[in-house]
Amino acid sequence: MAEDIEQAVSRRRTFAIIAHPDAGKTTLTEKLLLFGGAIQLAGEVKAKKDKIQTRSDWMKIERERGISVVTSVMTFEYEDNVFNLLDTPGHEDFADDTYRTLSAVDSAVMVIDAAKGIEPRTLKLFEVCRLRDIPIITFVNKMDRESRDPFEILDEIEQKLALDTAPITWPIGRGKTFSGTYHLALNAVRRGDDEKERTPVNGPDSNRVAGLLPENEREAFIEELELAREACRPLDIDAFREGHLTPVYFGSALRNYGVRDLIEALGAFGPPPRAQEADIRKVEATEDKMTSFVFKIQANMDPNHRDRIAFVRVCSGKLERGMKAKLVRTGKPMSLSAPQFFFARTRVTADEAFAGDVVGIPNHGTLRIGDTLTEGEEILFRGVPNFAPEILRRVRLGDAMKAKKLKEALHQMAEEGVVQLFSPEDGSPAIVGVVGALQLDVLKERLNFEYTLPVEFEMSRFSVCRWISADDKAEVLRFIEAHRGDIARDLDNDPVFLAQHAFSLNYEAERWKAIRFATIKDYQ
Ligand code: GDP
C-alpha cells in the first residue's frame, strides 16, 4: 500500500554502530536483527562477519562478497519503526569506507566494552560523528563479565569525549550476577530481552528487584540507584539531537540483555531522517521530489556478472521502481528499473523507498561515490568525504600491452572507492592512493581476479597528498604553474599537490599562504 511521505519519514531510523573491534558490534547487530524479526536464528551475521585476522582472511572475504550482502545495509522493523542499519567495516584500513557510510546515517549507536571503556577506535569514530553532528546512543556491552563501575564508565565518556551522559537504564547486578536492567525514569525492570514488556516496580527496594540480586548486593544496588538518580543528568532530547548528550544503556548483547531497551530508544527518540545539506539549499526529508546520493559501491555481489551495486541514501521524496532519475554529475537520465532492499539474508526489489532508506541500484559503472540523483533538480549533495591518502604507489604492470586496460580498471576501482587515483599533470603514469595498506591488497587481488591484470606496486617519490584550493582561483593556477611536476588531478579533475614528505609540504604552505592544503575533500 502506498505510504504517505510524512508518515513514512517519521517511522524511519537510519543508523550505524560504531565500536572498537571486539566490543561486540557484530553480536549486537545480530541481536538487533533477531529481535527485529529479520533473522530467525542468531549466528547468521557471525558467519559472514568481516573479522580480519590476517590479510589472506580479508581476501577470502572479498571473494565471498558474492553471497555476503550483510556487509552494507540491513533493514528490519520493530513495532512501528523501520530501521536501516548501515554496516561499517571493522578494520581501520578501511576507515574511509566507514566515514562515507557515516555520511548516510541520522544517528549512531556507540558500543563500549564495559571492562575496557573508550578505546582508540571508538574515540576516532566518535570524532567523525561529532564533526557531522550525529546524535549518539551509548550501549555499554558485556555487563555479564567483570566490568568497571557504571559511574566510572559514565565519567570516562564525559571526560574523554566531552559529551554529557544520561543513563536511561541501570544494570541490576554485574558480571555473574547481572540479571536485568532497571529503567530509572519509569521505575520498571526488564530481566532480559525475552521479556517484551518491562515490569513496573515501586522502586529499587521492591521485591522483584531483590529477587534478582544475591542478598549481599541488594543494599548496594539501592544506594547506587539513588545516587544515579541524584547525580546523573536526565534525558534532554534536544541536547541529544544536537550531539551534546548521549543516553546510556547497559546490557549484554551476547546474553540478550538491554538490546530491546536500545531498539525501543531508537524508536522512541532516535532522530528520523534529517534535512540534508546540498550545494545550493537544504533538502527536507519530507519534500515531494526524490533526491538521493551514492555513499558506497559494492562490486561483485554476483561474481558471475560484473555488476556493481550503488548504495544510495534517499534524502527526500519517494524513490520508485521504474522511475527516471537524473544523474546530476553528467546531466543524463537514468532509469531506476531494479532498486533493491537488503535484509539479513536476502535482497528484494524495492517498489518504493523514502528518506532514510538505503537502496541498492545495480549498474555497470554509471554511478560513482558521491553522485546525486534527483527528479531533475540541479543540486549536489556534498557530504561524502574523500580523505587524503597516507600511502601513494605507482602500479607496475608486467604486460605493457595491457596499459589501457589497466587504466580503465583503475578508473573503475577509484569510482568504487577502493582506491584513489591521481593523474600527474606531467603525463607520467597514474598514482594510486590509499588510507590503509589492506586496500592495496584488495586492489591487487581484484585487478588480478576480475581483470586478469597481475600488478605490483612501486614506491612513488611522493608520500603526501593534499587538495589545493584558494579563494582566488588565479592563485591556484599560479601555484600549479610553479609546481608542474608535483601536481596531479583526482577523479573529478580537482588538483592535488604531491609532496615528497611533510617537510616539503610545510615549506610550501609557508610560502603560499593563500593556498589551502586540504586533507579532506568534501566535494565542496
Ligand atoms: P566486534 O568485533 O565488535 O564485532 O565484536 P563481536 O561481536 O565479534 O564480539 C567480540 C567477542 O566478544 C566475541 O567473542 C563475542 O562472543 C563476545 N561478546 C560480545 N558481546 C558480549 C557480551 O555481551 N558478553 C560477553 N561475555 N561476551 C560478548
Image: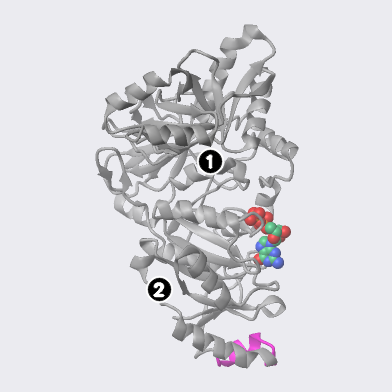
Q: Distance from label 1 to label 2 (Cα)?
A: 32 Å
Residue 106 visible to the viewer: no
User: Is the shortest distance between ligand 1 and the CB of mark 2 under 8 Å?
Assistant: no
Residue 284 visible to the viewer: yes
Q: Which of 32 and 463 is in front in this view?
A: 463
| Percent position of residue 314, x then y | 38, 42
Q: Residue at x 69, y 92 (%)?
A: 216
Left or right of 146, for residue 16: left
Q: Dividing the image into four quarters, tell me where ligand 1 lies.
A: bottom right
| Percent position of residue 284, x then y | 28, 48
Left or right of 101, for residue 195: right
Magenta extent:
205-215
Q: Mark 1 points at which residue?
A: 97
Is residue 206 inside the magenta stretch? yes
The local secondary structure at tag 2 comes to loop
| Percent position of residue 291, x then y | 33, 38
Q: Which amino acid does label 1 sit on?
A: Asp
Which label's residue is closer to the chain start, 1 or 2? 1
Is residue 238 inside the magenta stretch? no
Q: What residue type is labelled 2?
A: Leu
Q: Which residue is drawn at 33% across and 46% down?
A: 276
User: Is the shortest distance between ligand 1 and the CB of mark 1 under 8 Å?
Assistant: no
| Percent position of residue 88, x then y | 56, 47
Q: Name the disc covering residue 235, or none.
A: 2
Q: Which residue is drawn at 68% across and 33% down?
A: 63
- Quarter that holds the C terminus: top left
